Image: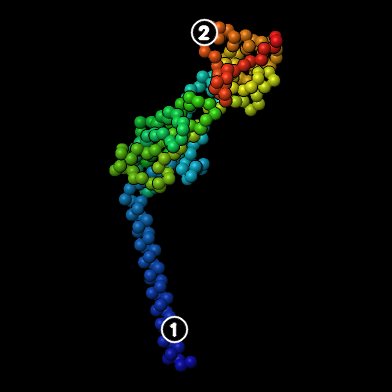
Amino acid sequence: MNIYLETTINHTAMKRNISLIFSLLFIFSACQKEEVEEYVSGARLNFNNDYKVENVPTIRCGFTDSDYLNKTTEITDSIEVVVMGLSTNTDRTFYCTTAPADSLYSMPVTVAESYIIPKNTYSTFIKFSIKAPGNFGKANKTYIQFDQSKNTGVFEPGNKEAQQCIIDCIYTLLPIEWNTDAWGKFSNGKYKFMIDHFQKLHDDIPPYRQEQEEIYDAYQKYKAAGNPPIMDDSTPAKEIEFINVNE
């Protein structure tokens, strides 16, 4: 090949490579600038939790028969709030609120009047309280979400899926193993009556004739005093029954 032609081709290729490098550097610089501007223009808040439902951070909690025995009507929990953006050398206040979730049942959730992102940090855990649901064995859901009407000017919305967190709560009375031979068919109402009477949980109530007779008589006296019969959860038209060991 002609030396002059070969030199010309190599020179042209080099110019193309240099142009490509400068183009890539320009694009990278523009992207970096856009990313920085995105964060600097306003810090953004997101809820964060490893467990998610449809990408929405979710806290699962519950009440049990122990809570019923101990008359626990409220529990506390927490979730992480993460800041996208630059930290500052001052504390920053933000606000949350609650809303019913898209479900048949919800329960009261109480958030604090305000929360703080401590200075020089990018996250904090916020605490909230959950009231015991008024039903048993059903999924109750309530949202905690950022109150953007109060946060504007300090924080901007972050990722769409992380602007709410779901509080998913179930009140479960049913023990791991229910003694049908001693107490008959399980019912939440029946078990509540047993806990109220014996002041014990299922596994601590002796499943013997004396206790069977005692709870049967207690329920008969309950009705004789004019109290309404306790109905079966799964069959609302049917009254609960305790085993009559004297028959």
Residue 138 rendering spot, x and y as whole percentages: 52, 30
State which quadrant residue 34 falls in. Answer: bottom left
Q: In the rendered view, would you say 125 is above or below 195? A: below
Label 1 neighbourhood size at 10 Å, few (<14), some (14-19), many (20+)? few
Q: In the rendered view, would you say 150 is above or below 246? A: below
Residue 36 rendering spot, x and y as whole percentages: 36, 55
What residue does disc 2 label?
A: 226
- The mark found on residue 10 in the picture is 1
* Residue at image location 37% in from the left, 34% down from the top: 97
* Residue at image location 48% in from the left, 22% down from the top: 73
- Left or right, 62 with reference to 18: right
Depth check: give the residue in front, 86 or 139.
Answer: 139
Q: Earlier in the sequence, mark 2 or mark 1?
A: 1
Helix, strand or loop for disc 2: loop
Q: In front: mark 2 or mark 1?
A: 2
Specify the farthest residue to the left: 153
Amino acid type, callout 2: Gly
Q: How far separated are the C-alphas under marks 2 and 1? A: 104 Å
- The mark found on residue 187 in the picture is none
Residue 87 rendering spot, x and y as whole percentages: 37, 46
Amino acid type, callout 1: Asn
* Residue at image location 54% in from the left, 22% down from the top: 236
Residue 47 seen in this snapshot: yes
Depth check: give the residue in front, 61 or 41.
Answer: 61
State which quadrant residue 120 falls in. Answer: top left
